[in-house]
Image (cartoon, helix red, strand yellow):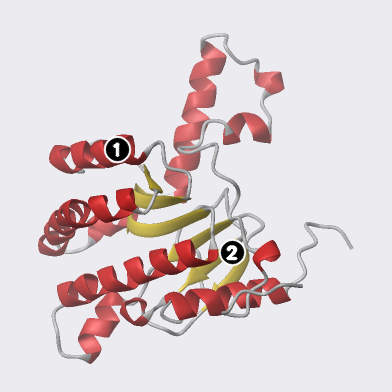
Amino acid sequence: MSRQPHGLDPDHLPAHVGIIMDGNGRWAGQRGLPRNAGHEAGEAALFDTVEGALEIGLDYLTVYAFSTENWKRPPSEVRWLMNFNRDLLLRRADELDERGVRVRFLGRSGRPVPRRLVEMIEQTEARTAHHTRMTFQVAFNYGGRAELVDAARQVAADAAAGRLRPAKVTAKSLQARLYLPDAPDVDLLIRTSGEQRLSNFLLWQAAYAELVFTDVLWPDFTRRDLFAAIAEYQRRSRRFGRV
């Protein structure tokens, strides 16, 4: 078996890795800094992780950037995060485009997401749509339950319009109405900061995912931590209900 320099089996990589990027606030608090400093530091961790994913040849990487529940945070922090994500797109769109990365967003794009940010998201998606080296998906204003509700509403609307018979509704019917139905299921889901819960992230797509929890706070996460999680994934036996 040929292994890559970092010890990973290139023939046994997860097709899709999801990451819950957690711990920015605690990282900042440990240093006596405002919470926003943790979010800023997390940008470097995110793009080192993206570089690592490209280095080993991952096909899909999805990160949890802003949840439907994050609107409950203090308004000043929410405003800062909206501006930060807008500026992040300005800073990093060229870099991702040059590296052949297709960028996609999943989540609800209506209000209260600022219209200018929605426009920038759409521009970035259109600009990188032809790339095939890796698909980088950003879950923004996203919640797994919200996604399933939206899919169920679409099933109901299609049934009411006669486009879908209720007796013919299957798991495949629902999956076809998810935000990004062509993305493969998540094979490996990583959460940083020591927390051990899914927090409403990719509930449908991660139904059979291998879960890896690390105590590393997100701003300290690097591609080495990504490789370590994938190495753990490669040590596991996935049976999908079989013996």
The amino acid pointed to by label 2 is: Leu
Name the spot of residue 39 as percent of width and height, x first.
23, 70
The amino acid pointed to by label 1 is: Arg
Secondary structure found at label 1:
helix
In this rendering, would 236 be left or right of 211?
right
The quadrant of the picture occupied by the N terminus is: bottom right
When asked about the image quadrant of residue 4, the answer is bottom right
The tag on residue 188 is 2
**Residue at point 81% right, 57% down?**
241
When asked about the image quadrant of residue 187, the answer is bottom right
**Residue at point 26% right, 68% down?**
43
**Residue at point 21% right, 43% down?**
113
Rendered position, 212 above or below 183: below
The tag on residue 3 is none
- Mark 2 or 1: the one toward you: 1
- Foreground of the two, 227 or 167: 227
Residue 53 visible in the shown view: yes
Residue 201 visible in the shown view: no
Q: Label 1, on which residue?
A: 127
Rendered position, 97 above or below 54: above
